[in-house]
Amino acid sequence: MADVQDRAFEALGFTKSTSDKGLVSYSRDLDQSNADNANIVLIHGYPQSSYIWRHVIPLLPKVPLYVPDMPGYGQSAPTSADKYGKLALGELILSALRDLLPSGPTVAQPVVIIGHDRGGRVAHHLALAPGNPAIKGFRITAVALLDIVPTLYQWRIGSSAAAQTGYFHWSFLANTALAMRLISAYGGGNWAREMIDRWAGKNAAGRARLASDDAPDVYARFFDKPAVVEASCRDYEAGAKEDAEYEAAAEREGRAIAVPLLLVYSAEFLPKRATIPIEQVWGPPWSERQDLVTSAPIGNGIGHFVAEEAPEEVAKAIRDWLLSIKQ
């Protein structure tokens, strides 16, 4: 099913690339990026691949776009077992992007990072590390997070029975060795289908959009690979260890998102996992100021997979936000 994904991106005018670390990505118009024309990076989540953006991309403005399969997901090669922290994954993604950009002025390239689910966590952690040498050459100017709360916040509300039930996979997948064996016995593809069906919304049209273009088969075939199952478990294991520690350190040190932040989320899915409004969740101390936060809740029974279930609403929220932060 990798060829289905490849053909979809080719039809959208993208070029496929594989980095020296085995990271597969699709890009378009990177030669048009400059200090005034930011690269937009779209990062998918679990249990999916870059294919989630197929509906949104045609609705976005004509800007430089870079769309990777996260390390270990989709067609991308896994990274080493200790490199699944979200900052480390973000560094790998930006390193691969750096290699594709035309050489020229040494001015840091502006980047807007838009991430869903696990990809949103990558975006969040990159936004907390503007001075990190590994992201040298880039200036993160804005971040959009699709249907997530901060990792540390999620762990902290674990005393809620509803949260524990809805996010059972967080602690399950973090036990990599056991989770791998159980998922393999069930079938990696079966597991991916089950999780997608569980987290999708009740809106019939949204579910149809999610399932269109053979998407469930694409994701299932990727998860039939033991290496993808292992990588995704290590992703969640890192979420319980270095990712939570990274956010706790940022909280202690007063590091927060200091750039415009867009929140796009399922109005029926995400608020059930929080104890306060989502906009407040992402305000101080996670953002430097509340006025940096723009929110676009999506209702009408749309579930977790907002980019596929409601691409028009997601694209409009992104377009309007991009225009607002340029002014």
Image: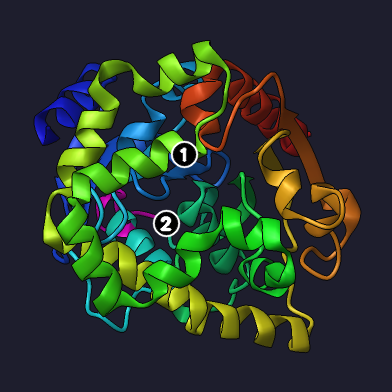
> Which of 279 and 206 lies nearest the eye of the viewer?
206
Which image quarter is the N terminus in?
A: top left
Residue 327's quadrant in the figure? top right
Compared with 261, 212 (above or below) is above
Magenta extent: 98-105
The residue lying toward the viewer, choosing from 283 and 155, is: 155
**Residue type at numbered disc 1:** Arg
- Compared with 4, 24 (above or below) is below
Q: Is residue 6 above or below residue 238?
A: above
Disc number lying in front (1 or 2): 1
- Residue tagged by mark 1? 198
Q: Which element carries disc 2, helix, strand or loop? A: loop
Which residue appears at 78% of the width and 57% of the height? 282
Name which residue lies at 66% across and 63% down: 150
Dots 1 and 2: beta carbons under 8 Å?
no
- The residue at which mark 2 appears reads as 105
Amino acid at dot 2: Pro
Magenta: predominant secondary structure element?
loop
Asked whether residue 156 appears in the rendered view, the answer is: yes
Instruction: Report the disc number at residue 33.
Output: none
Rendered residue at 51%/50% (across/down):
117
